[in-house]
Image: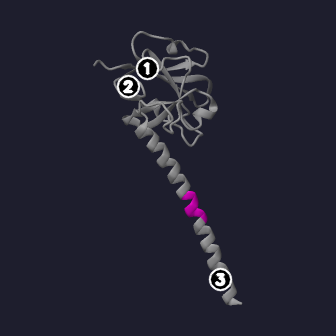
Amino acid sequence: MNKKLFVLFIVLVLAVSLTFLFRYDKKALTEEKKNETKENILQTDTEDDGYDEDVLGVLQIDKINLNGVVKEGSSSDILKDYIGHIEETAKYDGNIGLAAHNRGNEYSYFARINELEPGDEIIYKSRYGERKYTVNLKKEIIETDWSLLEGTKENKLTLITCIRNKTNQRLCVQAIQENI
């Protein structure tokens, strides 16, 4: 009887170990694929290269350890896994609007944008080129006030996210392109 219990115990240990190993490998592969996408986002060839044509670029903010993929659209499906490009805003020249979650998601890319201050640097690498921006504004806005997303002649980057316990307000961080 003890031999049967021992064999059963070994089988259970192996089953649990394999399940854990499978989940770990799956998560590692998902992260590897996202990193591969970040590294190859600047490819200009948009033919059937295996990359999602809705991926626009990578947003990098060293101060807050942010390095996230930007995808076209701001629906909840997109914001679940990406930084979303607000459709009505410029894609490269002008005022680029980006939105992301700051909590409650596996990928809450804007969790720390409240730490940004005027003078902080933001890098946006897109399929159209790469630009450096300097934060010049951090402001709470009412959810219906989209004036900071209006088109501009100068190149700007506008980041928008929710504010905890203020359902009708948004945090807006705006940056202007650094002089070349």
Q: Considering the image in quadrants, where does the C terminus appear?
A: top left
Circles 1 and 3: CB distance less than 8 Å? no
Give the residue number, with chain letter if any, for mark 2. 129
* Magenta highlight range: 19-24
Mark nearer the N terminus (1 vs 3): 3
Mark drawn on residue 56? none
| Local crowd size for mark 3, using a 10 Å CA cut-off: few (<14), some (14–19), many (≥20) | few
Q: Nearer the viewer, mark 1 or mark 3?
A: 1
- Which residue is more in the foreground, 51 or 70? 51
Q: Report x, y in % for residue 21.
A: 55, 63
User: What is the chief secondary structure element of the magenta stretch?
Assistant: helix
Could you tell whether 6 is left or right of 66 in the image? Answer: right
- Which residue is more in the foreground, 68 or 166? 68
Residue 163 visible in image: yes
| Local crowd size for mark 2, using a 10 Å CA cut-off: few (<14), some (14–19), many (≥20) | few
Residue 66 visible in image: no
Tag 3: amino acid? Val
Residue at the far right: name it: 1
Q: Report x, y in % for residue 103.
A: 56, 37
- Which residue is more in the foreground, 75 or 148? 75
Give the residue number, with chain letter if any, for mark 1. 92
- Decide whether residue 64 is among the magenta residues: no
Identified at 38% across, 28% down, the residue is: 122
- Which residue is more in the foreground, 50 or 124? 50
The Cα atoms of the two marked residues, 2 and 3, are separated by: 61 Å
Mark nearer the N terminus (2 vs 1): 1
Q: How is the image coloured?
A: one colour
